[in-house]
Image (tube, rainbow, N blue to C red):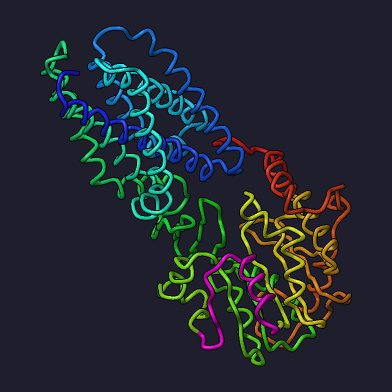
Amino acid sequence: MSAAPGTRLLLASVLVVATCGLVYELIAATMASYLLGDSVTQWSLVIGVYLSAMGLGSWLSKFVVRDLHARFIAVQLVIAVVGGLSAVALFYGYAYLASVRPLLFSILVIVGTMVGLEIPLLIRIVGAGEELKDTVARVLAFDYVGALLASLLFPLALLPHLGLVRTSMLCGLFNAAVALACTWVFRAHLPRPRAALVQAALVCAALAAGLAVGGRLERLAERELYDAPVIFSEKTAYQRLSITRSGDDIRLYIDGNLQFASSDEHRYHEALVHPALAGVAPRRALVLGGGDGLAVRELLKYPGLERIDLVDLDPGMTRLFGRDPLLVRINRGSLTDPRVHVHNADAMRWLEGHVRTNSEVYDVAVVDLPDPNNFSLGKLYTGSFYRLLRRVLSPAGVGVVQATSPYLAPRSFWCVVKTLAAAELHPRPYHAHVPSFGDWGFVLVSPAPRPEPTHLADVPLRFLDDALLPTLFVFPRDQQPPDVEANRLNDQLLVHYYEEDLRALPGRGGRG
């Protein structure tokens, strides 16, 4: 390196490449969790493969002995192309390939190896003419600051505002810009400076164009994941909300998982709410989850209710279902009813705060949370959570918990039942057929033992009646409880049961 401006450029490059390198890793892990589920496993595999590839790149760097500037620029362009296009490639790969895992790990190995090559090459270029200890100290200092920037920017700014596709293209553009700047500043060190300049400029232009249309590319890629046209898609701070429409059937997907279909959601929500309210005259109700307002809609059929507290983590969810005319028509404007009070908070933290600061208890609690496919959701199915739930119910109160499918995920379902029993909530499991989901399970709970309900309240229903109600609590011989343990916060066995249940399904894993 021959000039101070060149040194400053290379040190700035360390900051950029370190930030982008970690962002690519975070994108891959997020995409793996989004497309393949079981976030802990996916994140562990992504981190392990990526770090191993970086180690491979560092080892390979010893064989690069000539044209260091040219090799560094080439590495930047490879990372820019592969890393920049990684998110959109994974979206389309999931839609069209038999399994997206080979593509995922190929991207990780290529990007990780190139990132592993970067720092040794930079140390050797920056260190020309100065002591090794000074060079290593400066380069690694910038490298670690870049890692900190990535860890802050990705969850707080990049992912919520740009999404995965545009975030990957923006980072690719930064890598290409580093290559372009280095090509110009160090052109005297390059064997073919004009060709390198043209290559870097073309990659910059392509990624800039991709960034400009990245939102459209992401929407087009996402549409390939669903059977019906996507009419709405938004990445909130917590999850991706996608809504499809086919004729009169409206479907909500959260992170690619179906949450309801308007053609049969009345079956799910009637089965969720009304058995718990049989023989009960509630005044105060609590709903945990259910940000779509559909469980609240069913509760509002009871004229004696004076207050409903809805606790849902995502303000984007409750805002969407409180304002969008199409969705408001489905939930009948339940979220804007004056009796409904929306709290955007983590359900467990909200319960802890309520128990600590508020003596009011509820006559009924409806727990309508997503399935426990990761540890952040699994904590909301633990004994710790259910003991908090018990404390906010009145002594004569009742509750209900959606508990996955007793047919498709039997260990998960009965683990929830056993956990509720350990929390002294006297569970009474039942199930109902919902065509979009299959055989779906619920659990009635109460601080004091109660008999199974036999007579529904006199409210308008489309699915349930008094003749059907007792049959919901009957399980056939091939759905008897397996041997499972309760779900505890320190081990979260339920998350493992859930993943094992889904892997055991016939045909599971064709696109995973």
In the rendered image, the quadrant that contains the C terminus is top right
Asked whether residue 358 is drawn in magenta, I would say yes
Q: Position of residue 402 (x, y in %)?
A: 70, 63
Tell which of 284 and 320 is nearer to you.
284
Q: Is residue 383 left or right of residue 5?
A: right
Q: Position of residue 290 (x, y in %)?
A: 58, 69
Tell which of 237 and 477 is nearer to you.
237
Q: Residue at the spot x=83%, y=77% of the render?
A: 453
Q: Residue at the spot x=49%, y=57% of the render?
A: 238
Please determine whether, in this image, residue 143 is positioned above or below residue 313. above
Residue 359 quadrant: bottom right
Q: Residue at the spot x=10%, y=18% of the render?
A: 194
Q: Is residue 445 left or right of residue 253?
A: right
In the rendered image, the quadrant that contains the N terminus is top left
Residue 496 quadrant: top right
Total tally of numbered discs in the picture: 0
Tell which of 200 and 65 is nearer to you.
65
Q: Is residue 261 left or right of residue 420?
A: left
Q: Which residues are magenta?
A: 337-360
Please determine whether, in this image, residue 424 is positioned above or below residue 277. above
Asked whether residue 182 is drawn in magenta, I would say no
Q: Is residue 355 left or right of residue 188?
A: right
Q: Position of residue 241 (x, y in %)?
A: 46, 58
Please determine whether, in this image, residue 215 is positioned above or below residue 75. below
Q: Residue at the spot x=78%, y=70% of the render?
A: 444
Please determine whether, in this image, residue 387 is positioned above or below residue 195. below
